[in-house]
Image: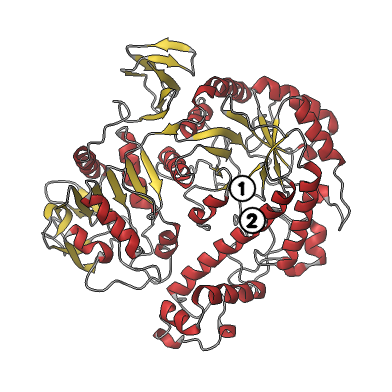
Amino acid sequence: MRQWPDDRIAFGGDYNPEQWPREVWDEDVRLMADAGVSFVTLGVFSWSWLEPTKGEYEFGWLDEVMDLMHRHGIAVDLATATATPPPWLSAAYPEILPVDREGRTLWPGSRQAWCPSSPLYRDFALALTDRMAARYHDHPALAMWHISNEYACHNLPCYCDTCAATFRRWLERRYTTTDALNHAWGTAFWSQRYSDWDDVLPPRLSTTFNNPTHVLDYSRFGSDTLLDFFLAEKEVIRRHSPDVRVTTNFMTMSTFRLLDYHDWAPHQDVVSTDHYVVDALEHPRAELSFHGDLTRGLAGGAPWILMEHSTSAVNWQPVNPAKLPGDTLLDSLTHVARGADTLGFFQWRQSRSGSEKFHSALVPHAGEDSDRFREVCELGAVAGRLGELVGSRVEADVAILWDFEAQWAVAGPCMPSAALDYATAAHAVHRLLRDRGVTCDVVHPDADLSRYRVVVVPTLYIVSDDAASAVAAAAEAGAQVLVTYFSGISDPDDHVRLGGYPGAFRELLGVRVEELFPLRVGEQVALEGGGSGTVWSEDARTLDAEVLHTYADGPLAGRPAATRRPVGEGAAWYLGTLPDDDTLGALVEQVVAAGGVAPAAEAPAGVEVVRRSSADGSWLFVLNHTDTDTTLTVAGHDLVSGRDVGPSTTVAARTAAVIREA
């Protein structure tokens, strides 16, 4: 068994030798050495090569590749190959195929065409996993097991009859009685009361809106069902390979919202994720930073693995622009700054055919004589020089609460505004703090909040009593708590908390909202003293809070839009709208100043600064996303350039420095 590379930032990615003639493999390992590759992920989509017909296995080619990696000192993250069934399996057993909400079967021809609840598919997948674990558990190249791939990316939710039966069993375990189910779902409305479990169906296409709690529970069910499948594969691996780490690659990017990774994370030996820059977002690099902090939160603050990202363009957006020179390095070091100790890419060699042939790779179609591959080699060299910070942790005094269940509920049917997106407020606050050099942990509402000086509660629509009490306790103990619009509204069953919004946080904030006034897309409301709000507004009354901003026009003119209330040793702040960047930026500056939170370093807008530290020292990441050189007051040794710097250092436009601080 090989240890995961820990003398450097591990560097590599998905390797798919089955796509290439045998003579290319030797060329691959030569180029891997040139690029500084220290790990590869093998076998992710290899089922049809490992079991070309039912019960007939062909491992010879994989044996050869594993041996090749071992001879060249490259660690292997070995996938169980169960992400996508081979054609013979779905042809022989079409009942394993998923069904969409309109009752249409989703046929093979791409990937992940299997029902998450299918016991038949599970049996075949576990049989393959068992064969692989038995064969490779003691192979000297094996460093980690990689179960399946990007769970739920294409086959969740499924609405087939198998899922319907499995959903009913899940509900029985959750509620025990139909009376408890009826109470949780509020089935007194629209004559939806159930008297027999067999009458319950998935929230399929219906005459009008589905029951919101029914829809929320189906999201919970889907996440739990796939987690159970993951755990079944993990158990098979553990029987053969008890001492090798096991993971699966999450997708902690804002466009993927189907799994509750807070439930999944405790079952990973190391948290790993995939992240791709979504060009259509207004602030794609700020989103990258946010989801690095989210992944670190899932890992409990520990270092994590970036299993996949891209050297340049992807293939799945309407338009797929290439990354600019320097972006491969900047994007990668942003992930490391936010806690990644491994940099993985999809994939090693860019495919000649198939759906992802225009998805960039470490070795592009142009080959080694290309600027992109030279940039890859530069990144590999930098990853080697960063070995001294492996195991260190990111410093953060601010927590942003993030709940996948609240995200599902906000996206449910019959909400005050379909234009309201759960992530908007969280991303805005995080981005403006990032612009000011303030690092945030993104954590679950049940996390320990006692060590944070500032706690941000953005659009936490559903919240438990315990989580709401913990937020109040943090303020009492001295934290500055910032709660945004549409928070505290409902309990975990999505039952509205009566007596006035924001429900669970009403007393903490000293604010009572009588009615919601969501804004139309593109609509703005002026704020007294300048600035404007978008997305949302509320008819609020202060109980015992100080008014910071009021609405200057519209039906809520004169009503409070932002407030502050002293609480114990801290304070509770409330935002009833989403202010423009200048107004919101000024407010978050007030909040962090009141909390005594300092930036990692003084830097201009567009220059991201984050600090990692350990008992051995501290490292300041300076990521210059601008087109202008920037100079900071910092002294030490820059691991990117290999130069000593100080008492100040200049970081060129669109480059980065990682400075071991003196």
The location of residue 291, given as percent across then percent down, is: 45, 43
Question: Whole-Å distance between the Cαs marked 1 and 2?
Answer: 8 Å
Determine whether the residue tagged by mark 1 lies in a helix, strand or loop: loop
In the image, what residue occupies the spot 43% across and 41% down?
293
> Nearest the camera: 447 or 153?
447
Looking at the image, tell me whether mark 1 or mark 2 is earlier in sequence order.
2
Report the disc number at residue 230: 2
Determine whether the residue tagged by mark 2 lies in a helix, strand or loop: helix
Write down the residue under mark 1. Answer: 248
* 520, above or below 390, in the image: below
| Quarter residue 289 falls in | top left
Q: Is residue 616 visible?
A: yes
Quadrant containing the C terminus is top left
The location of residue 7, given as percent across then percent down, is: 58, 24
> Nearest the camera: 230 or 185?
230
Classify 10 Å Cα crowding around label 1: few (below 14), some (14-19), many (20 and above): many
Residue type pointed to by label 2: Phe
Quadrant containing the N terminus is top right
In the image, what residue occupies the spot 30% across and 60% down?
468
Q: Is residue 253 left or right of residue 86?
A: left
| Contact flag, marks 1 and 2 (Cβ < 8 Å) | yes
* 524, above or below 181, in the image: above
The location of residue 161, given as percent across then percent down, is: 65, 76
The location of residue 486, given as percent across then percent down, is: 30, 61
| Quarter residue 2 falls in | top right
Q: Is residue 308 visible?
A: no
Q: Is residue 616 left or right of residue 319?
A: left
In the image, what residue occupies the spot 39% across and 14% down?
636
Residue type pointed to by label 1: Thr
> Nearest the camera: 334 or 392?
392
Q: Is residue 472 left or right of residue 49?
A: left
